[in-house]
Amino acid sequence: MLLLMELFCLRQLRVFHLIEAEVTYDKADWISRFPESGTCLESLIIYCVKCPINFDALENLVARSPSLKKLRVNRFVTLEQLYRVMIRALQLTHLGTGSFSPSENTCDQGPDLVSAFAACRLLVCLSGFREIVPDYLPAVYYVLSANITSLDFSYANITAANLNQS
């Protein structure tokens, strides 16, 4: 992990993928180690991280990465947090949603995902949906009429009946 932290000093880092790595140590705030100024980051894939990440640091990193096209978050990112990231990264073409379920302390009305998806006009690929709540499927259907060419529900816990209801 120390080597990873040293890599973040590189301002020219374009791709950072933790795909088959099993990152389980939740004490290290590695995501906040990216440069404070703008980054050249084009792809950030952290879906295999098995512990919560510093979401504020992730949100700030996304906000200062204007070239970021691919983002896949882990299952600890809630719908509310996903919404916050999406409205800061309208340039995304690929999005891995993480769990796609609300936090436990959410009020009845969740984030306006339809408007967030509508704002991300460049999206062509959606994946993730690890713990999707079927009530949120209509937000996904909205984007299907746009530019989506790849929709991966392979980790989703939904049934054919859920797909037919919306």
Image (cartoon, grey):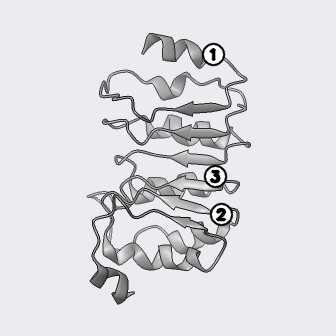
Q: Secondary structure at mark 2?
A: loop
Above or below: residue 86 compared with residue 35: below
Residue topped by disc 2: 120
Residue drawn where x is 50% and y is 78% of the image: 141
Above or below: residue 134 compared with residue 77: below
Depth check: give the residue in front, 112 or 124.
124
* Distance between mark 1 and mark 3 Cα atoms: 23 Å
* Distance between mark 1 and mark 2 Cα atoms: 29 Å
Dot 2 surroundings within 10 Å: few (below 14), some, or many (20 or more)? many
Q: Residue flagged by tag 3: what amino acid is it?
A: Arg
Report which quarter residue 60 is drawn in: top right
Residue topped by disc 1: 9
- First in sequence, mark 2 or 3: give its number: 3
Dot 3 surroundings within 10 Å: few (below 14), some, or many (20 or more)? some
- Looking at the rendered structure, which numbered label has been put on residue 88? 3
Query: Image quadrant for the C terminus?
Result: bottom left
